[in-house]
Image: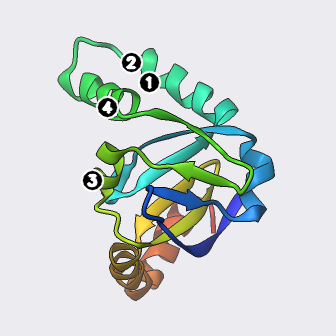
Amino acid sequence: MLIGEFTHTLDAKKRVSLPAKFRKELGKQAIITRGLDKCLFVYPLYEWSKFAEKLSTLSMNQKDKRDNARFFLAGASEADMDQLGRILIPDYLKKYAELKEKVIICGVYKRLEIWDEERWNKYRDEVEKDADVLAERLGELGAY
């Protein structure tokens, strides 16, 4: 299970060290792709396979389904982890997520998210302001 929030630095070669807590579950290779809200998603290979399979079954007759498949699948890249637990973030993904030097790596159960630190802080502050509303919605879903 991937959970928690960690601050790391993106080095000059566009590599980021993943928290040791996540390395075993990710293994030596992961998939990195565009995420929602201008972050990046990082999947263990076995989770990526499940997600990609679902995307591949979407009907190509509807534009929104084609867009979803293209957004995640065309934007994906294999990320090999080096001996120091670092992965390389391709230029196009760094640009998409507007990553600067400091990044936040969040565990979101089955995937990681990589955020620019400033964007993450703004996002988190907004969500925390509405924690009561979130709790009500979770209650409606039967999850809280």
Q: Nearer the viewer, mark 2 or mark 4?
A: 4
Identify residue type, mark 2: Leu
Q: In this view, does 49 lie above or below 129?
A: above
Q: Which residue is drawn at 40% across and 74% down?
A: 120
Of tags 3 and 1, the one toward the viewer is 3
Lower sequence index among marks 3 and 2: 2
Rendered view: 45 above or below 25: above
- Tell me whether circle 3 and circle 1 mark residues in contact (CB < 8 Å): no
* Marks 1 & 2, CB-CB < 8 Å contact: yes
Q: Distance between the residues labelled 3 and 1?
A: 24 Å
The residue carrying mark 4 is 68
Decide if residue 88 is on the left or right side of residue 74.
right
The answer to whether marks 4 and 1 mark residues whose Cβ atoms lie closer than 8 Å is yes
Number of numbered markers: 4
Task: Give the residue number, with chain letter if any, for mark 2.
Answer: 58
Residue positioned 48% across, 60% down in the render? 114
Task: Kindly indicate whether the residue at mark 4 contacts the one at mark 2 (C-beta within 8 angstroms).
Answer: yes
The residue carrying mark 1 is 55
Question: Which residue is denoted by mark 3 in the rendering?
Answer: 95
* Real-space CA distance between mark 2 and mark 4, rounded to the nearest whole angstrom: 9 Å
Q: Is residue 1 visible?
A: no
